[in-house]
Image: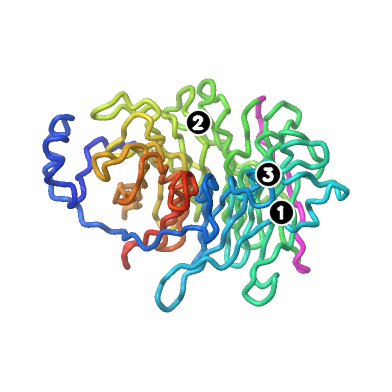
Amino acid sequence: MSVPTTCRSPSTRTFLSLLTVFAAFGCGLAATAPPAEARAAFAARLVAEDGASFDNLGFAVAVSGDTAVIGAPGADDRGRRDGTAYVFERDAEDGTWAQVAKLTPAMDNKALFFGGHTDQGDNFGKSVAVSGDVVVVGAPGEEIGAHADAGAAYVFERDAGGEDAWGQVARLTAGVAAAERRFGLAVAVDGGTAVVGAPGDPGALLFVGSARVFERDAAGDWNAVAELAPAGGATGDFFGFAVAVDGGTVLVGAPFADPAGLYSGSAYVFERDGAGGFRQAARLAAPDGDPGDRFGFAAGLADGTAVLGSPKDDVPGATSSGRNSGSAFVFERSSSGAWEAAAKLVASDNFQNDRFGSAVAIGAGTVIAGAPGKDAFFYTGTFGSGSLYVFRRGGEGGWTEQEQLFDEDALPFDLLGSAVAISGATLLAGTPDNDDRGPGSGSAMVFELEPGVD
């Protein structure tokens, strides 16, 4: 598989001032090429109306059409770091985005005499997903009875709280509560199917992990229909750390599995079996996996194509050792139904500790990869502000880096790219340490691909 290693041209704004800097780093003629024409444009920065310091808005993001959901797991809404999530919608006429709802769990889930818990440390909003009029929010730190960090997930639907109002319709759990299960650390939804990861599930082996599939029935109730576990799983795999769903296919990451050495990571594909359940169809691993890569840390799935982040992959760069620079892998389902490695994606300016692949998303022939550790000093004058990479599938099936995106108003360690999502031509990315509403209050950024590019 081809791995790009050339330097990226700087933006027009910084091009002339950086020629000598790039020359000093040995990037050669790549730095003197005319800057590529931008194909994505910044559209909006989304911040919570009541945002406060250390809310970490943007830790998790999701987008579906004109609806965006952004998690703020550090918010102190009812207790310290109990968390919240916000819904934003885009106006169909002028394209502006506005906050329309603040989501929190219904209070009747919180009373101790109902088997609930105190609110502190729930981390509601640590994971979010949206599909049409359905939103799922994870609360992996939720205490159930005496079981700390058992976790739960909540389903909200548009109009369930009144016309055009979002209301809670379901609370999803693992069934039998267990401490440290962290059910809800990852969530995904597609139509009437939701998947919730529980990477700390003890199962038959300590922290092997699990995932649970829920479906909405004709009456509108959400019911568990399948329990997913990895065939050949081992202690400490943390299966369920990342999840994705598309139609009848589910993708689950296990970044601490050991197929190529300790914590090299793996992922599993499950498909409907025709009898109402799911069967394991494939176990995926990086073709060049090494210990510590964390393959499966992030997952995306669309139209028979899977993308999996490997943020601690050591990919040597032109100017660094590439330690923890990161990568992402694309797998495609063949006509025979087999899942095959199709490409390894690496940033053209990869550098040590970028953590490229910490977040990934796929849709419409486009892969978005976040590199929250990116020192964007050459482009924005900041360290650790993070960046995004846009890859496009070509006519012959190959994947090419199309563009690198930054926050031109970034401050050091904003961590752009900690979470990413895509829907059509809309890209959404979290900056959970942005300081717009105080230190660590967080925000999210919307970018739009130009017409004809999506």
Q: CA distance from mark 3 to mark 1?
A: 21 Å
Here the colouring is: rainbow
Q: Position of residue 371 (x, y in %)?
A: 39, 40
Asked if residue 100 is among those painted magenta in the image, a careful observer would answer no
Q: Residue tagged by mark 1? A: 214
Q: Which residues are magenta?
A: 218-235
C-alpha gap between disc 3 and disc 2: 25 Å
Q: Quadrant of the C terminus?
A: bottom left
Depth check, front residue: 379 or 190: 379
Which of the image's four quarters has the N terminus? top left
The quadrant where residue 194 appears: bottom right
Identity of the amino acid at label 2?
Arg
Residue 364 image offset from top left, x and y in percent: 42, 59
Classed neighbour count for the residue bearing mark 1: other residues with Cα under 10 Å, few (<14), some (14–19), many (≥20): some
Q: Which mark is residue 294?
A: 2
How far apart marks 2 and 1 lie (CA) works out to: 27 Å
Residue at 31% from the left image edge and 37% from the top image edge:
2
Would residue 44 be seen by someone viewing this image from the given angle? yes
Residue name at image x 56 percent, y 50 percent: 72
Residue 91, given in percent of the width and then of the height, sits at 46, 74
Secondary structure under the numbered disc 1 in the rendered image: strand
Comparing labels 3 and 1, the label whose residue is closer to the camera: 3
Q: Which mark is on residue 122?
A: 3
